[in-house]
Image: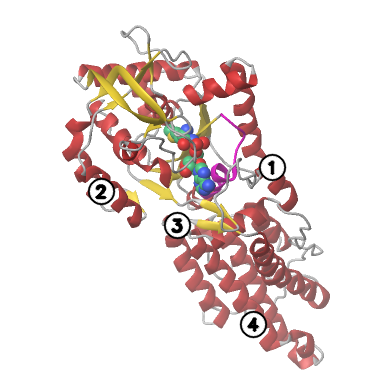
C-alpha cells in the first residue's frame, strides 16, 4: 500500500515564500517518518501554473506565460533540492499529460450531468483566484488575505453542480479524521451548512488556461485544473496520460496538507468533483495555520516578507525545521520571532543535544577508545532506558498526528534526561578512582545509547543533524523497526573524533 501525501501545488506568480516552505517541510517530515517505519510513500509537490494571476504576472514582466512558468517552477524545484526535500514527484500543471488527464476527468463529470451553463456575478480576488461571497454587499471590498481590492465580475460560463453533493459532503466531513485539526472542521461545517452552491469551472477570454473540450472559447478555471494535478502527479515519468492508470498508482490521496485559506477547495469542492467523476475522494485534509512575523502579517507591501533562500543560507535547514516545527503547533497560527529562533536552535540543538553527544563521545574516546564495553550492559531497567522507552512509545503517534512539536519534545526531553544523568553521575570525577571504571563504562554506554535514540527520534524532523549525530556514534543508515530499541549500540567499537553537531547561530541582521 502506498501512502500518498501532498503539499499544495504552488502558484508560480513568485518564487517560493515562507508559507510554501513551511507546508513542504511539514510534509517532508511526515514522509520521512513513514518511510522510516517501512511504509511506501508517494510524496507529491509541484506548481500550479495556469490562470489569470499567472497570466498577469507574466504580462507585467513582459514575458510569455510559458516562459515565466518555466523559470519560476525551475526555481521551486531547485529550492526544494536545497532544502533537502524528499518529494517523489514534482508536477507542473503545464505538463502536456496533465491536459489529457483534466479532459478525461471533465468528460466523466459532464457525462454524469454535473456540468451546466450559468451566470456568476460577484467580487473576485485574482490573488486567491476565488469569488469572495462574504463581500456581496460592500462597495469597495478588500480581500482579507491579500489586502487588495476585489474585482467585480459578471460572467456566463460552465458550472459544476456542487449543490447536488450537499449530503455526500456533509457525511464526508462528519467522518472522524477527514478534516484535521478539529477546529478547522468546524469552519468547513459552517460553510457547508449554509448550503452548497454550484461554482463556475470555466472562463471565457482567458487564454492562459486549458481549453474545455467541446466548449469553444472556454478555458478551465484554474482551481478545477490545479486540483487534478494531484492525480496527474501519480503517473510514472513519461507514462501515457491515462486517468485509470494514474489512479491505480496511488489514489486516493491519504493526506492533503494545505494552509487554512484553501481548505474549502480541498475539503468540499475537490471531493465533490471526485465523487462526480466516480473517483474516491481524498482520505484526509490537514489545514495548517498561518505564519506571521514579529506579530505582523507578512506581505510585500509591508516589506516584511522572509526570503527562504536567504534564511536557508544563514541558518541551515536543520535550524529552520527545528524552529518552525518545534515551536509552532502544526494546525495553529504561529509567529516567527528571530530571537526565539536563535534561542531555541542554540539551546536545544547546539547546547542540549550537540553538547550531549560531543562531550560523551569525547569521554568515551578518552577513557575507553570508543563505545565502552562494561561487564554488563545497562538493561531496560536502567533509568535512561525507561526514559527512552517512553519517548519511543509516544513519538510515532505524535508524528502520525502531525503533532511535530510534541515529537520534537519527545526527543529533546530524552536528551535533557541524559544530560541530567551525566551531571548526577559526574563520570569526569568518578573516573579518577580506578575502582569506578566499570561503573563509568556502564554510565557512558547508557548515555551514548540514549544519544543514539535521540538521533533516531529526530531523523524525520532533522534528517541532516540526525545523520551527523548517528555518524558520530558510528551508526549509519537507520530503520525504525530495527533501531528504535534500547541496547542496539555495539559495545567496544572505536568512535570517530567528535565534531560539533551544529554551529551556534549568530545573526546580526534581520533574517
Ligand atoms: N495554487 C494554490 C494551491 C493549489 S493546490 C491544488 C495555492 N498556492 S499558493 O502558492 O498561493 O499557496 C501555497 C500555500 O502557502 C497555501 O497552503 C497557503 O496556505 C500557504 N501560505 C501562504 N501564506 C502563508 C502564511 N503566511 N503562513 C503559512 N502558510 C501560508 O494556494
Residue 269 lies left or right of residue 228; in this view the side is: left
Residue beneath disc 1: 309
Give the spatial CA distance, label 2 vs label 1. 38 Å
SS type, badge 3: loop
Q: Residue placed at 55% from the left, 61% from the top?
A: 326
Of residue 483 and residue 355, the one placed in the foreground of this image is 355
Q: Residues within 10 Å of mark 2 (few under 14, many from 20)?
A: some
Give the spatial CA distance, label 1 vs label 4. 37 Å
The numbered dot on residue 332 is 3
Q: Residue placed at 22% from the left, 40% from the top?
A: 169
The mark tally for this picture is 4
The numbered dot on residue 189 is 2
Q: Are marks 2 and 4 in contact (CB under 8 Å)?
A: no
Of residue 388 and residue 313, the one placed in the foreground of this image is 313
Give the magenta part as a residue range: 13-26
Q: Is mark 2 within 8 Å of ligand 1?
A: no
The answer to if 16 sits in the magenta stretch is yes
Spot occupied by residue 162 in the image (x, y as percentages of width and height) = 23, 30
- Compared with 140, 511 (above or below) is below
Spot occupied by residue 242 in the image (x, y as percentages of width and height) = 38, 18
Counting residues from the start of the chain, the first of labels 2 and 1 encountered is: 2
Counting residues from the start of the chain, the first of labels 3 and 4 encountered is: 3
Q: Are marks 3 and 2 in contact (CB under 8 Å)?
A: no
Q: Nearer the viewer, mark 3 or mark 4?
A: 3
Of residue 140 and residue 224, the one placed in the foreground of this image is 140
Residue 122 lies left or right of residue 142; in this view the side is: left
Residue beneath disc 4: 420
Amino acid at each position: 500500500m502506498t501512502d500518498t501525501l501532498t503539499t499544495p501545488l504552488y502558484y508560480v506568480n513568485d518564487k517560493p515564500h515562507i508559507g510554501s516552505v513551511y507546508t513542504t517541510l511539514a510534509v517532508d517530515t511526515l514522509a520521512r517518518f513513514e518511510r522510516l517505519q517501512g511504509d511506501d510513500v508517494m510524496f507529491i509537490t509541484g506548481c500550479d501554473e495556469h490562470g489569470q494571476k499567472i497570466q498577469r504576472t507574466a504580462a507585467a514582466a513582459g514575458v510569455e506565460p510559458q516562459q515565466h512558468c518555466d523559470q519560476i517552477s525551475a526555481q521551486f524545484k531547485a529550492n526544494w533540492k536545497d532544502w533537502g526535500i524528499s518529494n517523489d514527484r514534482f508536477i507542473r500543471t503545464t505538463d502536456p499529460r496533465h491536459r489529457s488527464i483534466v479532459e478525461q476527468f471533465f468528460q466523466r463529470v459532464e457525462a454524469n450531468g454535473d456540468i451546466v451553463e450559468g451566470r456568476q456575478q460577484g467580487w473576485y480576488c485574482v490573488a486567491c483566484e476565488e469569488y469572495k461571497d462574504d463581500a456581496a454587499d460592500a462597495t469597495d471590498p478588500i480581500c482579507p488575505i491579500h489586502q487588495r481590492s476585489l474585482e467585480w465580475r459578471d460572467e456566463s460560463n460552465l458550472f459544476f453542480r456542487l449543490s447536488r453533493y450537499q449530503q455526500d459532503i456533509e457525511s464526508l466531513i462528519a467522518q472522524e479524521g477527514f478534516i484535521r485539526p478539529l477546529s478547522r472542521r468546524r469552519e468547513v461545517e459552517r460553510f457547508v451548512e449554509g448550503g452548497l452552491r454550484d461554482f463556475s469551472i470555466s472562463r471565457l477570454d482567458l487564454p492562459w488556461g486549458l481549453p474545455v473540450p467541446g466548449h469553444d472559447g472556454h478555458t478551465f478555471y484554474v482551481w478545477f485544473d490545479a486540483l487534478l494535478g494531484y492525480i496527474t502527479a501519480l503517473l510514472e515519468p513519461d507514462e501515457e496520460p491515462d486517468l485509470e492508470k494514474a489512479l491505480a498508482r496511488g489514489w486516493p490521496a491519504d493526506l492533503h496538507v494545505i494552509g487554512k485559506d484553501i481548505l474549502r477547495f480541498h475539503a468540499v469542492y475537490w471531493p465533490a468533483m471526485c465523487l462526480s467523476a466516480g473517483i474516491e475522494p481524498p482520505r484526509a485534509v490537514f489545514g495548517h495555520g498561518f505564519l506571521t512575523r514579529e506579530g505582523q502579517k507578512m506581505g510585500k507591501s509591508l516589506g516584511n516578507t522572509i526570503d527562504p533562500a536567504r534564511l536557508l543560507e544563514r541558518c541551515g535547514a536543520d535550524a529552520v525545521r527545528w524552529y518552525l516545527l518545534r515551536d509552532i503547533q502544526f494546525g495553529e497560527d504561529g509567529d516567527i520571532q528571530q530571537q526565539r529562533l536563535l534561542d531555541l536552535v542554540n539551546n536545544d540543538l547546539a547546547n542540549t543535544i550537540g553538547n550531549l553527544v560531543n562531550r560523551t563521545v569525547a569521554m568515551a574516546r578518552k577513557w575507553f577508545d570508543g563505545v565502552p564495553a562494561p561487564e554488563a550492559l545497562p538493561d531496560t531497567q536502567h533509568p535512561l532506558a525507561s526514559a527512552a522507552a517512553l519517548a519511543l512509545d509516544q513519538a510515532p503517534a505524535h508524528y502520525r498526528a502531525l503533532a511535530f512539536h510534541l515529537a520534537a519534545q519527545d526527543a529533546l526531553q530524552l536528551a535533557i534526561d541524559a544530560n541530567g544523568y551525566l551531571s548526577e553521575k559526574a563520570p569526569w570525577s568518578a573516573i579518577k578512582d580506578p575502582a569506578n571504571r566499570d561503573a563509568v563504562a556502564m554510565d557512558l554506554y547508557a548515555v551514548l545509547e540514549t544519544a543514539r535514540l535521540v538521533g533516531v527520534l529526530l531523523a524525520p524532523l532533522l534528517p541532516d543533524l540526525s545523520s551527523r549525530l548517528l555518524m558520530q556514534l558510528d551508526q549509519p543508515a537507520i530503520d525504525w523497526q530495527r533501531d528504535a530499541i534500547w541496547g542496539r549500540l555495539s559495545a567496544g567499537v572505536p568512535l570517530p573524533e567528535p565534531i560539533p553537531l551544529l554551529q551556534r547561530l549568530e545573526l546580526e541582521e534581520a533574517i
